[in-house]
Image (cartoon, coloured by chain):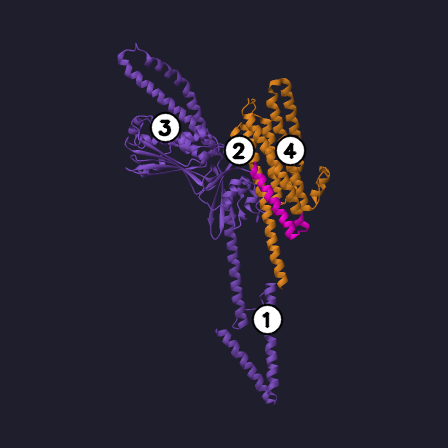
Chain colours: A purple, B orange
């Protein structure tokens, strides 16, 4: 009990005792006590009422800082009140600053709750995606941004992914969207305008395609003359070897250009159609027969589920198989073994090419699908690779919504696995 | 006490049903929108693969229509909704029919795009079709936005825009007739262009219908076949 509270109780008891004393003098103890008690009650009620009035009107002049309990109560109240007001103003200022800074951001940000309803968003979202800040609060984000890919992203649990969707407001603009979870069940949707980046990528693709195309016609002329020179019996003997080399190099250049053009075609087209069922088992055994004919190649084994079919583009899957197989042959000694496998795996399907070759150092694996990447510059050029094979494989697989997984142990061989999603597969044992 | 608890519970579930129905319609709208944009892109860029993909994916729209229809029937039977809720269900039943038709027209455009891709392309690469297509795609998008936000002003805007689309369609038709008269060998190709334009124009009509249902849903007034001037009066109040 505080000092003033104790004083308050003592005063009250003394006052009531005094009342009882006065009453006793007149021989009416209980009446004296009652009268003084009523007076004390009246005084407290009066204090309470004026405190209430002061609270309502905000005019605290009647209460002065003093020793009494009411004055103490009031001054403590006033202190807390003023502190709360100050704190509130501080918070408000902070909030305003935060809001200003999020509004200044060029990227759009939307805060979503557990039901994907919009809690708040910054100004950029309005310009990028047409969200209305006041009107759309509480709406589900997938009711406003209805692009199926974005809806799948927001409702799915995979927050590593990002999708690119056409802007619903600005024609020709593309938005990159990603979802970051935070707090309890809250999500942040970040929207970024990537039109320039995509345009740049397209320019690069177009340039490569055009340059390859333009280089091809002069090369045709050169290789035509070189071919006829090489076949000429009257060629002076000191020129035979140079001309042979010119011929093989011009063939190589031709192949590079062909593969570059193929690559840019794959890159610039979207997802492959899925109305054509490919007999992968047949395709694999055809590939085996083609390569078996070559001398000093490794032994090729095919293990395929004959009923399992892949939905996609036949020519592209063929080039995936041929590229992976010729890569494997190039890196496997003649006494080695290459296994082509085609099997279903929990709805999905896996096309795997496994060899017992020299393997790949782990630090090189992430770079394998880059254009013209070579693990060993000198060696693989002699072996005849162009350096675009795996890039073509990667892009052909992308068009089939598939992923390429590479695992390798140096010295023991490598495995290239193409994993096709369930919607690209028919006739698997799971369907039957 | 117990009774009020019970009704509160039912109404919460009911709210959830209605909310779920709205979400389904809007996700169907999103699918139709993307089908339409893909179809137009296939038409304008001559991408036959994309065109065929659109045509093959139409079943997804149809499936959604069937399941939303079932859901509407279930809500009507179980909840016997009244007033605004009933209007919503009625509007949803009509909206999905129009959305499904838009999906069908997009499918048609996809087919035509794959056919046109195999033929000679005019020097302007179907610029008029692109303009009309973009316009119509915006109408569908705005119609779905109006549906999501129950935005009557936006809905009226789309209703009015349909006139513009009709004019553009007429211009394309005239142009096509001229082409056919100039060079009868082009008739086969130009006929396909006319069909595509016709489909786009129909999509504009369907978007307009959806907006009329939105107005009905929000205000309970039927503005079909009433002409724009009357409608504007309603929108102001």
Is residue A73 in view from this perspective?
yes
Q: Residues within 10 Å of mark 2 (few under 14, many from 20)?
A: many
Which residue in the protein does label 3 denote? A289
x and y, in percent, of residue A181 in the image: 47, 48
- What number is the disc on residue A48? 1
Name which residue lies at 62% across and 28% down.
B195
Q: Are marks 4 and 3 in contact (CB under 8 Å)?
A: no
Of the residues tagged 4 and 3, which is closer to the observer? 3
Q: Residue furthest top?
A: A234
| Mark 4 and mark 3: Cα distance apart in space | 54 Å
Q: Is residue A270 magenta?
A: no
Disc assigned to residue B53: 2
Q: Earlier in the sequence, mark 1 or mark 3?
A: 1
Chain of the residue displaying label 3: A
Query: Which marked residue is nearer to the observer: mark 4 or mark 1?
Result: 4
Question: Is tag 2's residue or tag 4's residue first in the polypeptide sequence?
Answer: 2
Q: Quadrant of the N terminus of chain B?
A: bottom right
Q: Quadrant of residue A403?
A: top left
The local crowd at label 4, few if under 14, some if 14 to 19, many if 20 or more residues have their Cα within 10 Å, is many
Query: Label 3's element?
Result: helix
Asked if marks 1 and 2 touch (Cβ < 8 Å), the reply is: no
């Amino acid at each position: 009990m505080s000092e003033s509270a104790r004083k308050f109780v003592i005063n009250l008891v003394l006052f009531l005792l005094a009342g009882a004393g006065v009453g006793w003098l007149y021989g009416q103890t209980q009446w004296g006590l009652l009268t003084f008690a009523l007076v004390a009650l009246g005084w407290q009620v009066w204090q309470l009422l004026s405190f209430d009035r002061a609270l309502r009107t905000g005019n605290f002049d009647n209460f002065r800082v003093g020793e009494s309990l009411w004055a103490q109560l009031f001054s403590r109240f006033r202190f807390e009140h003023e502190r709360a007001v100050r704190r509130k103003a501080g918070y408000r200022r902070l909030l305003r600053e935060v809001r200003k800074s999020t509004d200044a951001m060029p990227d759009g940000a939307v805060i979503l709750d557990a039901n994907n309803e919009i809690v708040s968003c910054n100004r950029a979202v309005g310009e990028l995606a047409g969200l209305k800040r006041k009107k759309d609060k509480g709406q589900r984000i997938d009711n406003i941004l209805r692009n199926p890919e974005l809806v799948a992203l927001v409702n799915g649990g995979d927050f590593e992914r990002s999708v690119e969707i056409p802007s619903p407001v600005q024609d020709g603009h593309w938005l990159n969207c990603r979802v970051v979870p935070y707090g309890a069940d809250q999500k942040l949707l970040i929207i970024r305008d990537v039109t320039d980046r995509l345009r740049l990528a397209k320019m690069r693709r177009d340039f490569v395609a055009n340059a390859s195309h333009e280089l091809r016609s002069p090369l045709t002329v050169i290789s035509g003359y070189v071919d006829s020179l090489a076949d000429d019996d009257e060629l002076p003997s000191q020129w035979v070897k140079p001309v042979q080399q010119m011929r093989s190099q011009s063939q190589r250049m031709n192949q590079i250009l062909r593969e570059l053009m193929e690559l840019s075609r794959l890159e610039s087209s979207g997802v492959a159609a899925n109305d054509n069922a490919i007999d992968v088992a047949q395709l694999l055994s055809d590939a085996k027969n083609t390569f078996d004919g070559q001398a000093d190649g490794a032994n090729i084994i095919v293990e395929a589920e004959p009923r399992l079919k892949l939905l996609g583009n036949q020519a592209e899957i063929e080039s995936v198989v041929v590229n992976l197989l010729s890569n494997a042959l190039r890196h496997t000694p003649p006494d080695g073994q290459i296994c082509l496998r085609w099997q279903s795996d929990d709805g999905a399907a896996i096309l795997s090419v496994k060899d017992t070759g020299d393997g790949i150092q782990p630090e090189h694996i992430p770079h394998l699908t880059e254009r013209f990447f070579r693990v060993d510059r000198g060696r693989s050029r002699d072996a005849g690779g162009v350096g675009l094979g795996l890039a073509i494989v990667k892009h052909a697989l992308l068009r089939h919504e598939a992923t390429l997984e590479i695992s390798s142990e140096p010295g023991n061989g490598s495995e290239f696995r193409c994993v096709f999603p369930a919607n690209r597969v028919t006739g698997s044992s799971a369907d039957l | 006490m117990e009774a009020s608890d019970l009704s509160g519970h039912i109404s919460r579930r009911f709210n959830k049903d209605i909310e779920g129905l709205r979400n389904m319609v809007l996700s169907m709208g999103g699918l139709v929108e993307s089908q339409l944009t893909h179809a137009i892109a296939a038409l304008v860029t001559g991408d036959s693969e994309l065109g065929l993909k659109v045509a093959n994916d139409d079943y997804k729209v149809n499936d959604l229509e069937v399941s939303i229809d079932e859901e509407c029937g279930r809500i009507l039977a179980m909840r016997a909704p009244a007033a605004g809720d009933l209007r919503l269900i009625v509007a949803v039943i009509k909206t999905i029919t129009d959305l499904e038709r838009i999906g069908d027209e997009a499918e048609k455009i996809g087919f035509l795009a794959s056919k046109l891709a195999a033929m000679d392309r005019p020097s302007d690469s179907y610029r008029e079709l692109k303009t009309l297509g973009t316009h119509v795609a915006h109408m569908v998008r705005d119609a779905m936005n109006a549906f999501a936000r129950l935005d009557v002003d936006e809905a009226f805007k789309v209703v009015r825009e349909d006139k513009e689309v009709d004019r553009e369609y007429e211009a394309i038709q005239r142009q096509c007739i001229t082409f056919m008269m100039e060079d009868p060998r082009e008739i086969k190709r130009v006929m396909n262009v006319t069909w595509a334009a016709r489909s786009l124009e129909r999509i504009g009509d369907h978007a307009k219908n959806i907006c009329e249902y939105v107005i009905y849903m929000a205000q309970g007034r039927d503005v079909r076949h009433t002409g724009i001037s009357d409608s504007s009066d309603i929108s102001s109040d």
